[in-house]
């Protein structure tokens, strides 16, 4: 099992929900910089943290498989959110939701204090997984323990309704941000301006404006977390109905062929239904094959906005932290923090802007395909009604009544599902149309932030040069 550097205590370190913190590491996970909140909550000084592996604060009660999963994501170039219990220097602990993203020459981790029911569920799952992991490790080794524990964790997520870890971390980040928003708003309303450089005033102002804009995007795009789920529900229903319709049409055609000449008209109608059902099935197949990538893109975009929202909160908080001596005490570290935070926030926000346009086009194209499927189903309904009329006119066709009634029910259900899909896609397209209108404003704010950060970095460089001159003298 993990042997901590300090003895864990059954006591938590206290910090406010509004106290957001971050750190940067190199590609090996060695700490390059951490803001004041990070050093204060961890109990370590900046000098004690910089250059150390990030697992200096690793708590033994977090399963190894969580960190293995984390590194799998990061080494694949993907961001990951995870609940983590950290160990402070004095042995006390503190929980965070860590949002870690690859950045220039390393990784950026921004953290918030979790408070949702999903967090409580995650703690219970960790305890179960850790127990199994430690049992296996005692018998074999760490690698075997991780391999045995990982499926248990994923199974636990599946039992909670999350098909994979991506779905879980998207939900966790979204829930925690929704819980955090009013707390951040309350703090923003009580901040008092103090005497500081014009550069820092502009930095905080730009960060605040960006927070407001991205917050609006987050609230609008958060509904796209459920769009994919709702579409896939209809996807499964349509897939099953399509198979049922094809089978019923085939049965009708076989029954009509047994009637000889008397069933000639019914045979034509049944074949027509069969042909149209095959066409509809092909159209549904095409629709559903395109639905998967669209839903994945919608989820990715919504997640990117959530990540950008948290990073914007942290950026504004950090800009407030950099006042007076806090800015001058470690100009090199400040430059590191500013550059990593701003570059990641700018990159992710611009990715969201580009993604909105592509998602709008994809949704419109898919909506048009869904309308075509609806029209095909309506044409099948006309053929089915003709079949019912013919059955009523045929004294020997009583057995067909049930078949055509079943076909009618299937068609009606298919029509309802197609209309639901079309409506969902149309609503999503309208929402994105409104979001696209935000793009010019967001682009301008990102450019302003980039310029202000450049000024702040220049200021930190000047302070570094001043320090060097003093040393030389």
Image (cartoon, rainbow, N blue to C red):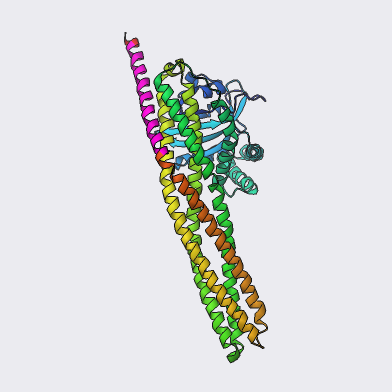
The number of discs equals: 0
Q: In the picture provided, is 210 more to the left or to the right than 148? A: left
Residue 467 part of the magenta segment: yes
Is residue 192 in sight in this rendering?
yes
Residue 256 part of the magenta segment: no
Which of 463 and 218 lies nearest the eye of the viewer?
218
Is residue 34 in sight in this rendering?
no
Residue 133: image quadrant is top right
Quarter of the picture holding the N terminus: top right
Which of 429 and 302 lies nearest the eye of the viewer?
429
Residue 102: image quadrant is top left
The structure residue drawn at horizontal position 54% and vertical position 76%, both measured from the top left corner, is 274
Looking at the rendering, the stretch of residues picked out in magenta corresponds to: 441-469
Residue 121: image quadrant is top right
Quarter of the picture holding the C terminus: top left
146 lies above or below 8: below
Q: Position of residue 284 (x, y in %)?
A: 51, 65
View extreme (bottom): residue: 261
Q: Position of residue 108 (x, y in %)?
A: 46, 32
The structure residue drawn at horizontal position 57% and vertical position 52%, both measured from the top left corner, is 229
Which of 171 and 423 lies nearest the eye of the viewer?
423
Query: Secondary structure of the magenta portion, mostly?
Result: helix
View extreme (top): residue: 473
Q: Position of residue 379 (x, y in %)?
A: 53, 73
The structure residue drawn at horizontal position 63% and vertical position 70%, both measured from the top left corner, is 409
240 lies above or below 351: below
């Amino acid at each position: 099992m993990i042997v901590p550097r300090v003895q864990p205590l059954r006591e938590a370190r206290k910090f406010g929900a509004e106290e957001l913190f971050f750190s940067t590491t190199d590609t090996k996970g060695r700490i390059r910089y951490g803001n004041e909140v990070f050093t204060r909550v961890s109990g370590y000084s900046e000098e004690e943290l910089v250059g150390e592996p990030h697992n200096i604060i690793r708590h033994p009660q977090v399963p190894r498989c969580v960190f293995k999963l984390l590194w799998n994501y990061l080494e694949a170039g993907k961001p990951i959110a995870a609940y983590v219990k950290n160990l402070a220097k004095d042995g006390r602990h503190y929980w965070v939701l860590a949002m870690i993203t690859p950045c220039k020459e390393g990784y950026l981790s921004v953290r918030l204090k979790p408070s949702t029911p999903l967090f409580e569920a995650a703690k219970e799952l960790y305890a179960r997984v850790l127990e199994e992991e430690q049992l296996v490790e005692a018998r074999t080794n760490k690698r075997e323990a991780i391999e045995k524990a990982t499926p248990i964790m994923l199974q636990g997520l599946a039992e909670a309704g999350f098909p994979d870890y991506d779905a879980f971390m998207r939900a966790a980040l979204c829930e925690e941000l929704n819980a955090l928003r009013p707390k951040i708003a309350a703090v923003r309303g009580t901040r008092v301006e103090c005497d500081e450089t014009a550069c820092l005033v502009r930095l905080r102002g730009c960060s605040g404006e960006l927070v407001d804009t991205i917050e609006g995007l987050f609230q609008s795009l958060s509904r796209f977390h459920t769009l994919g789920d709702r579409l896939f529900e209809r996807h499964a229903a349509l897939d099953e109905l399509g198979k049922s319709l094809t089978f019923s049409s085939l049965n009708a055609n076989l029954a009509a062929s047994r009637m000889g000449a008397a069933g000639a008209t019914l045979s034509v109608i049944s074949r027509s239904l069969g042909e149209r059902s095959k066409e509809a099935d092909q159209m549904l197949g095409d629709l559903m094959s395109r639905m998967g990538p669209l839903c994945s893109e919608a989820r990715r975009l919504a997640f990117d906005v959530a990540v950008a929202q948290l990073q914007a909160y942290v950026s504004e908080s950090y800009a407030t932290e950099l006042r007076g001596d806090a800015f001058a005490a470690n100009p090199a570290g400040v430059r590191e923090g500013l550059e990593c935070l701003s570059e990641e926030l700018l990159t992710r926000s611009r990715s969201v802007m580009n993604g909105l346009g592509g998602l709008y086009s994809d949704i419109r194209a898919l909506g048009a395909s869904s309308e075509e499927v609806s029209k095909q189903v309506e044409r099948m309904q006309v053929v089915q009604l003709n079949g019912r009329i013919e059955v009523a006119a045929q004294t020997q066709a009583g057995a067909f009544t049930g078949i055509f009634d079943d076909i009618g029910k299937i068609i009606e259900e298919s029509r309802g599902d197609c209309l639901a899909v079309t409506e969902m896609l149309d609503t999503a397209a309208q929402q994105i149309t409104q979001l696209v209108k935000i793009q010019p404003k967001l682009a301008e704010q990102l450019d302003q932030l980039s310029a202000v950060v450049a000024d702040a970095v220049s200021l930190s460089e000047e302070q570094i040069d001043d320090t060097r001159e003093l040393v030389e003298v």
